[in-house]
Amino acid sequence: MLKKILFEIKNMGYISISNIAHKLNMSEELIEDGINQLIRMGYIKENENTNSCNTSCGNCPYANTCNKTFVKTMEITEKGEKLLNNL
């Protein structure tokens, strides 16, 4: 399950718990727990700086609120990339 969540995060380019839950046919709570586990295990990490977003604004669902409200961003770590490469 965690690999599937990580794979969806990679493919989406951003994290949408509701979209991942819908795509994997799981509850949002289960996806949120999975993301928290991936963080604890070091496969993804939260970015402290909201200006470090590397998604182009045209593709970002938060483009209208960027720099107006805090948007928590995450990225797949090197450890997470290695796991994905082994799929």
Image (cartoon, rainbow, N blue to C red):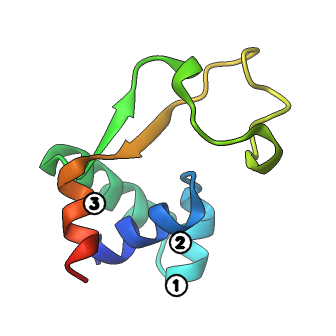
Q: Amino acid at mark 3?
A: Glu
Count residues near mark 1 (Cα–Cα under 10 Å), then give few for <14, some for 14-19, many for 20+: few
In the picture, the disc for residue 21 is 2
Give percent across and percent down for residue 4: 36, 77
Give percent across and percent down for residue 26: 47, 78
Q: Nearer the viewer, residue 30 or 4?
A: 4
Name which quarter of the figure residue 65 lies in.
top right
54 lies above or below 14:
above
84 lies above or below 14:
below
Label 1 and label 3: CA atoms lie apart by 24 Å
Pair 1/3: label in front? 3
- Tag count in the figure? 3
Q: Amino acid at mark 2?
A: Ala
Count residues near mark 2 (Cα–Cα under 10 Å), then give few for <14, some for 14-19, many for 20+: some
Label 2 and label 1: CA atoms lie apart by 6 Å
Query: In the rendered image, which residue does mark 1 sit on?
Result: 25
Residue at 14% across / 50% down in the picture? 41
